[in-house]
Image (tube, helix red, strand yellow):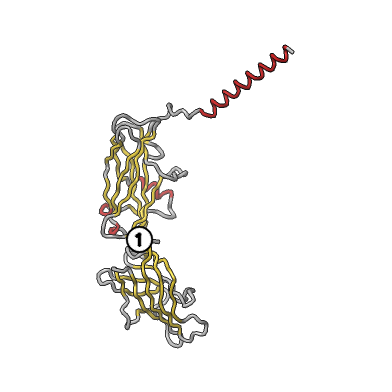
């Protein structure tokens, strides 16, 4: 009986020691004391191919500059008691490195007249992160191109600059000022129609995407809402001075504006009023549409 009690006591002590050990391991925190502090440009999804990280912004052309913000971060186990002055550069070599790894979709350098940003920024004492503002002049960018703004940390008050996060390319896509989601209503004429495709329609919607600085891609519909064929490459082309609209089709040279209708854009209501025709009798076609801006797409 005595031996049995001794063994029971030992078992209880082992359980206590084991439980204590398990609890200690469960609550143990990672040790950051050996981590080298670095200054970096953080991104949500870093690349894994050893090239250059990227950030993305999409601009809609407007007269006022468009604001964009990225961050500089001090990655360390604790903050620093003094300011960290960070020097940045616009680095074409960084963009070259990015393009070398993305030959299927290379980026064009953002022109110097299309942005402004500071090349020095301070991470205040006892903080980790600071915003870096960039102003983009969207009207100086071509919606037909994809741009990149390469930024590199060149100095950080003697702090180590991150090897993998020391540079970034801000990818800039720009949409012209007419780009967006539109409501659509109108009337379409189809000579000799026996399929119920001709007539009035309403309550439809369509995304009008940029095609250069002053044009939009457009798909004409029948009364049923199905796409009208034979007029591929259809675009709405705006004269920004007069707001007059010219309709064009890359697949159908017969497509022209209806000369009896004032095809135009109303900037006050963001509405297109367009009328055009194509083909010849006995297979002539015509459409008159109203497109009103709803939201960005």
Viewport quadrant of the N terminus = top right
Q: Which residue is nearer to you in this view: 179 or 250?
A: 179
Q: Which residue is nearer to you in this view: 190 or 52?
A: 190
User: Quarter of the image holding residue 13?
Assistant: top right
Viewport quadrant of the C terminus = bottom left
Decide: is 90 above or below 239. above
User: Residue visible at 27% across and 40% down?
Assistant: 120
The secondary element bearing badge 1 is classed as: strand
Q: Residues within 10 Å of mark 1 (few under 14, many from 20)?
A: many
Decide: is 103 above or below 273. above
Residue furthest top in the image: 2
Q: How many marks?
A: 1
- x and y, in percent, of residue 28 in the image: 50, 28
Q: Which residue is nearer to you in this view: 171 or 291?
A: 291
User: Residue visible at 45% across and 83% down?
Assistant: 190
Q: Which residue is mark 1?
A: 175
Residue furthest right in the image: 1
Decide: is 148 above or below 206. above
User: Residue visible at 57% across and 26% down?
Assistant: 22
User: Quarter of the image holding residue 53?
Assistant: top left
User: Residue visible at 40% across and 47% down?
Assistant: 54
Decide: is 129 above or below 285. above
Q: Which residue is nearer to you in this view: 248 or 45?
A: 45
- x and y, in percent, of residue 296 in the image: 38, 61
- x and y, in percent, of residue 235 in the image: 38, 71
- x and y, in percent, of residue 139 in the image: 28, 59
């Amino acid at each position: 009986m005595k031996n049995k009690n001794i063994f029971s006591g030992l078992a209880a002590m082992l359980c206590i020691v084991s439980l204590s050990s398990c609890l200690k391991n469960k609550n143990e925190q990672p040790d950051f004391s050996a981590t080298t502090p670095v200054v970096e440009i953080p991104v949500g999804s870093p690349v894994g191919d050893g090239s250059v990280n990227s950030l993305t912004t999409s601009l809609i052309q407007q007269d006022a500059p468009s604001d964009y913000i990225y961050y500089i971060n001090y990655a360390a186990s604790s903050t620093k008691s003094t300011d960290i002055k960070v020097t940045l550069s616009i680095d074409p070599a960084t963009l070259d490195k990015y393009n070398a790894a993305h030959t299927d979709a290379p980026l064009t350098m953002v022109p110097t007249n299309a942005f402004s940003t500071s090349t020095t920024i301070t991470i205040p004492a006892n903080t980790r992160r600071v915003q870096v503002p960039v102003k983009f002049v969207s009207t100086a960018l071509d919606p037909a191109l994809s741009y990149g703004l390469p930024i590199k940390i060149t100095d950080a008050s003697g702090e180590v600059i991150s090897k993998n996060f020391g540079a970034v390319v801000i990818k800039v896509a720009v949409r012209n000022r007419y780009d967006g989601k539109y409501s659509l209503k109108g009337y379409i004429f189809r000579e000799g129609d026996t399929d119920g495709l001709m007539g009035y329609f309403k309550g439809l919607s369509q995304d009008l995407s940029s095609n250069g600085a002053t044009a939009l891609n457009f798909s004409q519909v029948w009364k049923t809402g199905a796409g009208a064929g034979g007029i591929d490459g259809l675009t709405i082309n705006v004269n920004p001075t007069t707001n007059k609209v010219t309709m064009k089709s890359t697949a159908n040279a017969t497509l022209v504006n209806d000369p009896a209708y004032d095809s135009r854009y109303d900037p006050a209501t963001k509405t297109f009023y367009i009328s055009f025709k194509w083909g010849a009798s006995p297979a002539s076609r015509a459409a008159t549409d109203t497109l009103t801006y709803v939201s960005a797409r």
